[in-house]
């Protein structure tokens, strides 16, 4: 199975970039957008001078629980930059969301509670709310994470979007907000430690 089909099987349609979009990023943004692929994993990420963004991480079901995800995250942490990623809020109907959050909690990620992130899916045309998690070797502020997330959104998520999807994603200022008084709970706080 191709790397793209592995991701497509695992991630919801509203979160997936098209294969053409991802292949173009790998080709035209090869200085920042990368694929790390092995027999049991696919890791798609962007590496900028001051931060990393994990776009997709997939570990095959028969390799889970063997430390592969941890090794992939450790490889990213070794670069010594903040790491940012998007996650779905916990959906108790979908057990993988809680498992994913447990994993990132164990890896030392924090929830950027002051950052709001709502984007209309070009695939489903529905509002899709995500939360931002981050890990930082030097305790970056949520404001710094917000600025880095804005850059990533403009350089990766919306790169040639109208060319690939026939329409554009919303502008960054409609999608990402920074509000220290944002009314949201820490999505990692209520998880039971595993």
Image (tube, helix red, strand yellow):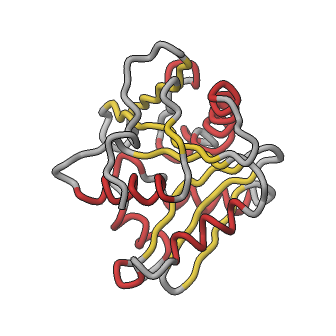
Residue furthest toward the front? 193
Residue furthest toward the left? 93
Between 83 and 192, the one nearer to me in the picture: 192
Count up the numbered dots: 0
Give the quadrant of residue 172. Answer: top right
Between 30 and 61, the one nearer to me in the picture: 61
Q: Residue at x 47, y 29 (%)?
A: 117
Q: Is residue 67 above or below residue 192?
A: below
Between 123 and 16, the one nearer to me in the picture: 16
> Percent from the top left, x then y, of residue 53?
64, 49
Q: Is residue 98 left or right of residue 165?
A: left
Q: Is residue 84 above or below residue 32?
A: above
Q: Residue at x 37, y 33 (%)?
A: 129
> Percent from the top left, x then y, of residue 37?
59, 77
Q: Is residue 159 left or right of residue 86?
A: right
> Percent from the top left, x then y, of residue 108?
56, 52
Give the quadrant of residue 95. Answer: bottom left
Q: Is residue 135 left or right of residue 166?
A: right
Between 173 and 73, the one nearer to me in the picture: 73
Q: Is residue 123 above or below residue 28?
A: above
Q: Is residue 66 above or below residue 19?
A: below
Q: Residue at x 57, y 19 (%)?
A: 173
> Percent from the top left, x then y, of residue 154?
65, 34
Give the quadrant of residue 1. Answer: bottom left
Q: Residue at x 78, y 60 (%)?
A: 79
Name the image quarter holding the C terminus. Answer: bottom left
């Amino acid at each position: 199975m191709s790397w793209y089909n592995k991701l497509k099987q695992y991630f919801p349609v509203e979160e997936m970039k098209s294969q053409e979009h991802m292949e173009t990023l790998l080709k035209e943004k090869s200085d920042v957008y990368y694929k790390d692929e092995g027999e049991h994993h696919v890791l798609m990420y962007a590496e900028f001078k001051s931060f990393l963004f994990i776009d997709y991480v997939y570990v095959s079901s028969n390799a889970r629980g063997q430390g592969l995800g941890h090794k992939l995250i450790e490889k990213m942490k070794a670069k010594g930059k903040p790491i940012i990623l998007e996650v779905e809020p916990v959906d108790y109907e979908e057990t993988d969301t809680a498992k994913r959050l447990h994993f990132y909690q164990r890896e030392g990620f924090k929830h950027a509670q002051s950052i709001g992130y709502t984007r209309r899916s070009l695939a489903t045309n529905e509002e899709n709310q995500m939360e931002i998690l981050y890990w930082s070797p030097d305790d970056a502020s949520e404001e710094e994470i917000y600025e880095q997330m804005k850059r990533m959104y403009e350089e990766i998520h919306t790169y040639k979007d109208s060319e690939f999807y026939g329409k554009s994603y919303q502008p960054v200022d409609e999608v990402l907000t920074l509000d220290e008084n944002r009314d949201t709970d820490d999505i990692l706080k209520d998880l039971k430690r595993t």
